[in-house]
Amino acid sequence: MKKKVIILGGGVAGMSAAHELLERGFDVEVFEKHKEYVGGKARSVNVPDTNTQFPDKYLPGEHGFRFFPGFYRHVTDTMKRIPQKTKDRTYSKETCFDNLVDTETIKIARYNLPPIVFPTDFIGSWANIKMVYQLAKKHKEILGLLPGEGMFFGKQLFSIMASCDERRAGQYEQISWWDFMAADGKSDGYQKLLVIGITRTLVAADAHKASTKTDGNIIIQLLYNFINPLIRTDRVFNAPTNEAWLDPWYDYLVSKGMVYHKHANLKEFSIEDGKIASVQIHLPEEKKSIHVSGDYYLLAVPADRADETISEEMKQLDPASGKIGNLVKDMSWMTGMQFYLNKEVKINPGHVNYAYSEWALTSFDQVHFWKDYDLSTRYNGKVKSILSVDISDWSDPDSDGDAADADSLEHIKDQVWQQLEKSLNRPGETVIDKSMIEFYYLDHDIIIHNGGKNFNKERMLVNTVDSWKNRPEATTKIPNLFLASDYVKTYTDLATMEAANEAARRAVNSILDASGSNAAKCKLWKLEEPALLSPIKWYDGMRYRKDPTSSFSMPLWIKVVMIPWGILYAIYFLLKVIIFKLSGLKPS
């Protein structure tokens, strides 16, 4: 008889777990609080009241735009196993992974200064190499750095790259990104571009609080992606997320036997003999609560919701789950606003980082990548482009009022647009102006209270200093309860779709162990780093294990060893690229 798994939460983690369990012969039932959409924060939405021409043609909105860096492997592996349907509703050979397309450049827009533009593929062409060379050659003038600051930042970044994993987990977990980069007293360009800008826009984190271990690991992953021509550095969808990924995923899993309940709110667990006996689910539309039971229970909700749901009795049985509340204290806001414009605005064929914006804005020109997406049938027919903006700092003391305290949507819209205009427009060049706005949408998870504190129903986990110790494993001491969410300990170690998918795989592997299943385990990938720095990391590991209080350093003999090693590695890598190109293969 098949074992049944109750999955509580139908976001990326919950659906990833359902996918893996169904492939291994389990019965799966999912309960999701959202009334209309699957996929959690990854969802796109039909913007209310914009189907004025046709009942089913809405403007597309979203919690925040999606992108898939080259180091993502777990979630993209799952996407490769989600088939797309053809017009006659049969499955094609193409998968949702085929809906990912590459961006071209990243732009850093600044107040009263020219933008900084660099390619997502540093060595993909001679033009890209020249662009990167010019940026490196004139980095002090372009970035506004004082003498020595660029060299110091590079030295600190290199020390992360060359440090052993134990030092990163031990020392770098205990120090903030701001302190590690010694940002106090540095130039405005150093602080805003190299220190604050990276953490605010990448992970919605305060550089004064963000862990150097997490920030450093992710930043060097992106850097390795930029310089590796065999990797697609920055990928985005060719359509709204629901169309490109979540709807086909849901349909496929249902066809495989998944039972998925929308608008089903998790209330509480019932415990008997140290195990989960059942879970109470509230059904608002039916105005009743039900008890559901299975062999195993997989909690796949965000950290704040998990902390609310895990009772004191459960925390006594599983002390690690009692630490989740410590993670909730530092959860942040990172939420999207979309502007629907009546002009074809082309700001950048990729992401834009508004480095000096008070609310830590980033944006993405979506329609540029949505080929054959017809906006003329939606809303009033005048919309030509969509500028999707993520707001990452809702409490900046230097701005004209905090976003989190704004008394109206109109005020938030005006402040965001003002910061966009100030960043993009320059004397003699108007890229955007307010007359272009036909409509705008702020994610409905932001609840505006006039005269009171606003509320965000879906906050984001932030990896703060020394927070790893508060994160649980996917397995709990309650033998039939498992955890799958971005707060679970993973190789990815960052609150992302990738971490959610990896956590789901870990939970499924634990269920396989608990059930005695002979099915193959879900594959897990560590973050990959090139072997170029292996000798230094090996030496640093020996030093750190001998003296955990030591700081990173390289003696002369290691520098000498690195000369022939570096030459050999360069030859190996060049041959690898040549063989790859001659074989006609494409970066994955």
Image (cartoon, rainbow, N blue to C red):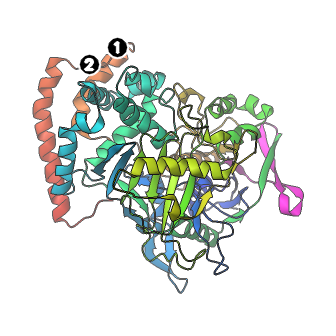
Seen from the viewer's position, the closer of residues 562 and 22 is: 562
Seen from the viewer's position, the closer of residues 139 and 576 is: 139
Up-down relation of residue 37 to residue 182 (above or below) = below
Please give the name of the residue rendered at 70% of the width and 62% of the height, measured from the top-left corner: 1
Locate residue 219: give its quadrant: top left
Q: Position of residue 141 (x, y in %)?
A: 24, 36
Seen from the viewer's position, the closer of residues 143 and 544 is: 143
Q: Position of residue 507 (x, y in %)?
A: 59, 46
Question: Which stretch is magenta?
Answer: 272-299
Check the image and name the residue furthest to the right: 288
Pointers 2 and 1 in contact (C-beta within 8 Å)? yes
Would residue 347 be found to the left or right of residue 261 on screen? Answer: left
Q: Which mark is residue 553?
A: 2
Q: Is residue 275 magenta?
A: yes
Up-down relation of residue 384 to residue 496 (above or below) = below
Q: Position of residue 285 (x, y in %)?
A: 84, 63
| Amino acid type assigned to the residue bearing label 2 in the image | Ser
Locate residue 53: give its quadrant: bottom right
Q: Which mark is residue 479?
A: none
Seen from the viewer's position, the closer of residues 29 and 242 is: 242
Q: Position of residue 380 (x, y in %)?
A: 60, 76
Label 1: which residue?
550
Up-down relation of residue 536 to residue 360 (above or below) = above
Q: Is residue 108 magenta?
A: no
